[in-house]
Image (cartoon, grey):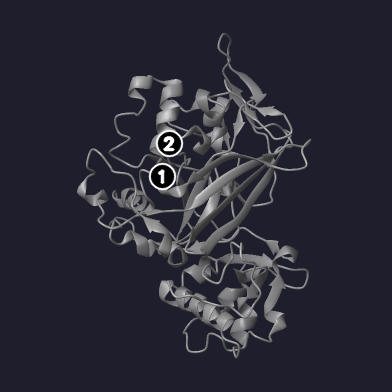
């Protein structure tokens, strides 16, 4: 990797290094929502940078920079969006660039309001962690046959609710629904088993046509970038409703994503081999290159009574049994088309050790072994006024590419 040095002061531990440059939608009191790039503790306003000629020669309508979502920008295609990112990167390393003394093109990261980065047309949630699926199977089915027969043959997924996907900072009300006590008829009640699920999501960056499939070799071209994803779950509601058609009210009340989309180009240096897939997959799911990503992930919980959050798990995206390319190839093998802005979530990311499990369901083993917070409180599942904080970053040879923070607070049922 070529060493890059910026004239802009960037903290050494910043997620938003000169090697990252993720895209997002921001606003200020004086600026309507628009497209920006995060760098260190600043946001580059791409509209102003473009007005000063930074993107001269590129053939696109600069009005995309003034949109309140990234959909139109992403639709320009990677040949354009990658070049825009590279020009910003070069300018931030060039003392003579138009950005050097263009103060109006920069906003302080801690003073901007971040918005949902894309208009999500469709959302699919997968179930692609071998460890998570095995843990759930052990809890609720036969421990000796924890995985269902199809699990190692297809990336299992379901179609979720796009309307309830929200950005970091939007608080979540505890949902209510039908719960089935062991020895009585079902009741309508707020969930008693509210959970987070540590996931990542990829944003579709290219449209496919109805009736056509995206091959495993083409899939990377259709993936624009990644976000952190919290697939909130009401475990007791979900348990009663999911047979025979799968998750519904136990999932659809909310899902949260981080506001900055980290491009696949920024993550390329962190690509690694995934777990051995045995039995061998069908040819349309077979790939020869490394398809997983070494991204460190962690979740912390801060209670209303605590001054500091407690980290409850540390996991890694590299653990996933089914990778993103396989998920997209399978999603479209039947001719289902995808559109720019569609979101595909990984499924809960759990590793092989208890401290790497990606949900309270696993960390507390369905409430039988409560998680202890730093202030002495214990949690079987999330309580009202708990704040859940997710973070993620990749690091190699002193190069750090991160996602910032995904943070939400649990509010009482309305």
Q: Nearer the viewer, residue 345 or 332?
A: 345
Residue 399 at least partly seen = yes
Query: Residue 149's x, y, as percent?
Result: 29, 29
Q: Quadrant of residue 27?
A: bottom right
Q: Quadrant of residue 47?
A: bottom right
Q: How many marks?
A: 2
Disc 2/disc 1 C-alpha distance (Å): 8 Å
Q: Are marks 2 and 1 in contact (CB under 8 Å)?
A: yes
Q: Residue at x 73, y 72 (%)?
A: 31
Identify the element where label 1 is drawn.
Answer: helix
Q: Residue at x 59, y 21 (%)?
A: 179
| Residue at numbered disc 1 | 319
Name the residue at the front extreme. Answer: 397
Left/right placement of residue 322 relative to residue 343 reads left
| Quadrant into which the C terminus falls | top right
Left/right placement of residue 137 relative to residue 240 reads left
Sort mark 2 into few (<14), some (14-19) or many (20+) by Cα contacts within 10 Å.
Answer: few
Q: Earlier in the sequence, mark 2 or mark 1?
A: 1
| Residue at numbered disc 2 | 352
Depicted 268 relative to depicted 315: above or below: below
Sort mark 1 into few (<14), some (14-19) or many (20+) by Cα contacts within 10 Å.
Answer: many
Depicted 400 relative to depicted 245: above or below: below
Depicted 21 relative to depicted 48: above or below: above
| Quadrant into which the N terminus falls | bottom left
């Amino acid at each position: 990797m070529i060493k890059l040095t910026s004239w802009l002061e960037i903290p050494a531990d910043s997620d938003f290094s000169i090697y990252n440059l993720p895209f997002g939608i921001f606003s200020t009191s004086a600026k309507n929502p628009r497209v920006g790039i995060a760098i260190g503790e600043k946001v580059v306003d791409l509209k102003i940078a473009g007005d000063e000629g930074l993107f001269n020669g590129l053939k696109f309508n600069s009005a995309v920079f003034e949109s309140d979502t990234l959909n139109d920008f992403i639709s320009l295609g990677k040949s354009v969006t990658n070049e825009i990112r590279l020009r910003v990167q070069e300018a931030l390393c060039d003392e003579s660039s138009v950005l050097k003394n263009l103060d109006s093109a920069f906003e302080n990261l801690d003073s901007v309001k971040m918005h949902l980065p894309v208009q999500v047309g469709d959302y699919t949630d997968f179930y692609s962690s071998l460890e998570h699926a095995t843990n759930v199977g052990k809890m609720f089915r036969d421990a000796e046959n924890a995985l269902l027969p199809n699990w190692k043959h297809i990336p299992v997924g379901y179609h979720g609710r796009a309307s309830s996907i929200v950005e970091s900072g939007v608080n979540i009300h505890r949902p209510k629904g039908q719960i089935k006590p062991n020895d009585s008829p079902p009741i309508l009640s707020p969930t008693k088993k509210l959970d987070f699920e540590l996931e990542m999501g990829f944003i579709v960056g290219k449209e496919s046509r109805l009736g056509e499939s995206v091959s495993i070799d083409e899939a990377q071209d259709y993936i624009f970038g990644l976000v952190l994803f919290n697939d909130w779950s009401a475990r007791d509601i979900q348990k009663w409703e999911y047979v025979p058609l799968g998750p519904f009210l136990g999932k659809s009340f909310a899902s949260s994503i981080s506001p900055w989309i980290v491009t696949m180009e920024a993550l390329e240096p962190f690509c690694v081999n995934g777990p051995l897939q045995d039995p061998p997959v069908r040819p349309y799911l077979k790939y020869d290159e490394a398809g997983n990503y070494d991204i460190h992930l962690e979740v912390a919980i801060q209670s209303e009574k605590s001054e500091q959050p407690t980290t409850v798990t540390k996991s890694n995206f590299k653990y996933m049994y089914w990778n993103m390319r396989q998920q997209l190839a399978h999603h479209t093998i039947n001719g289902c088309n995808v559109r720019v802005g569609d979101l595909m979530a990984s499924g809960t990311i759990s590793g092989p050790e208890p401290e790497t499990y990606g949900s309270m369901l696993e960390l507390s083993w369905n409430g039988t072994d409560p998680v202890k917070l730093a202030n002495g409180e214990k949690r079987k599942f999330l309580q009202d006024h708990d704040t859940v904080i997710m973070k993620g970053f990749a690091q190699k040879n002193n190069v750090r590419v991160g996602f910032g923070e995904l943070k939400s607070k649990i509010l009482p049922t309305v």
